[in-house]
Amino acid sequence: MLDTEFTVASADDGYRFRVQSHGRWRRVGRHQAPADAAACHLVDLVAPLAAVCPILAPTELEHRVNRSLGRPAAVDGSGVRLLWATVHVHVDPQDLHDATMALRDRAEARRRLREQRLRLEQAVAVRDLLREDPTLAAAMMLAESPADVGEHTVALVKQLAEVVAAHSPGSTWVATARLLEVAFGTLPAEARTYAVDSMCTALAEFTATIETGAALRSAHGSASGPEVGDLRDVS
């Protein structure tokens, strides 16, 4: 008869299955310890299956091992034949509890990580919105929570937009553009045309291209216009 008990490592580091086995063997050679040979054969069969099985799945391991033990098998090089065997797989209750809690902790950590990534993506989207169009960010707040939007919200959006712009790539040019926007708003039409044409002339001189100048003139509704010197004479 084969009656033995042993432990094997599970797929979870630090946790082991306890295996009880029963069966029958037959000596067909001259091995001096046929029972040990049959037991070692059983351990060698169970260990690799247990190594890829989670500690929380002892029943699965038991079924897989017993499927392999359902028919007679020769024990290699020992002169022993295992006629049949069956195993029962157990896990210490404390190990079950600890592994279950660890599994829950990992699931909770993954959930928190997903939420953090989602909040970060939302924050990036709001930042980009404030950078590109603060009024759209205010409109979004109004659509989502109209009761909470007031003068303080508009002021806050403006302040946030300024902070975002100050820390954005090319923030110096963003600030320059804002200053030019304010300054242009106080100039008469002729002076704005003169300023735009002056910048176009400078760009054409230093970059040897007229595309940017044409885009500036188009944006400000200015024709190709006279040269800078002619504008000075007009003014």
Image: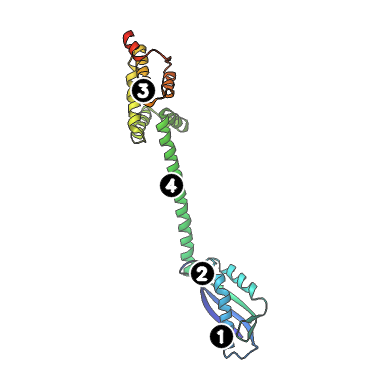
Q: Which residue lies furthest to the top in this view?
A: 234
Which residue in the protein does label 2 denote?
10
- Relative to 45, 109 lies left or right: left
Q: Residue 36 carries which label?
A: 1
Which residue sits at x=58%, y=69%? Answer: 61
Q: How far apart are marks 3 and 4 (CA)?
A: 50 Å
Q: Which amino acid does label 2 sit on?
A: Ser
Please say if 154 is above or below 32.
above
Most foreground residue, 108 or 29? 29
- Label 2 crowd bin: few (<14), some (14–19), many (20+), radius 10 Å: many
Give the percent coordinates (x, y) of residue 11.
Answer: 51, 67
- Residue type of the residue flagged with mark 4: Gln
For label 3, count other residues whose C-alpha is less than 10 Å away and answer few (under 14), some (14-19) or many (20+): few
Q: Mark 3 points at which residue?
A: 205
Q: Where is residue 35 in the image (x, y as percent from the top left)?
A: 58, 86
Mark 3 vs mark 4, foreground winner is 3
State which tag comes first along the sequence, 1 or 2.
2
- Seen in the picture, residue 200 relative to 49 is either above or below; the reply is above
* Disc nearer the start of the sequence (2/3): 2
Could you tell me how far apart the alpha carbons at marks 1 and 3 are, in whole angstroms?
95 Å
- Residue occupying image coordinates x 60% and y 85%: 78
